[in-house]
Image (cartoon, grey):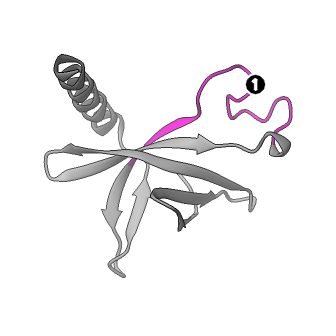
Amino acid sequence: MADEKEFLEDGDATVIEFTDEDGNAFYYEEEMIIPVGDDQYALLVGLHDGDEHEPGCACGCEDGDEDVLIAKIVVNEEGEEEYVEPTDEEFALVQKAYDALMDEEDAEG
């Protein structure tokens, strides 16, 4: 998913910085945590400054699509949380859990 992650505090929001192999930084806000069994996954929404993006930047900003990622939260050897890309099977389970949470929320609201 990314080579380097850093947590940034922005009031009540948790903002995660991902740095790719070329040194480009991308920022995502942790929208929600989705529990699946003993694992936790984060729904991350891209934060974009209009000045940072150019046509063809491939983030989805110019076609109106929201830049959303699902990341598995794991604890590394130093005891710190890291965000890693889930397997296809994990992604399918997270998607199912997310749909169930949204159905439950719709039923309550």
For the residue pair 70 and 12, the one nearer the viewer reads as: 12
Seen from the viewer's position, the closer of residues 89 and 109 is 109
Name the residue that disc number 1 marks.
62
Q: State yes or no: residue 67 in magenta.
A: yes
- Is residue 18 shown above or below 54? below
Report the residue at 23% width, 25% height from top: 105
Residue 65 x/y as whole percent: 62, 23
Q: In screen coordinates, is 85 left or right of 63?
A: left
> Which residue shows up at 29% across the image and 29% down it?
92
Would you place residue 52 above or below residue 58 in this image? below
Above or below, 48 against 105 in this view is below
Decide if residue 44 is on the left or right side of residue 109: right
Main secondary structure of the magenta stretch: loop
User: Dot 1, crowdedness within 10 Å: few (<14), some or many (≥20)?
Assistant: few
90 to the left or right of 44 = left
Q: Which region of the structure is painted magenta? A: 53-71
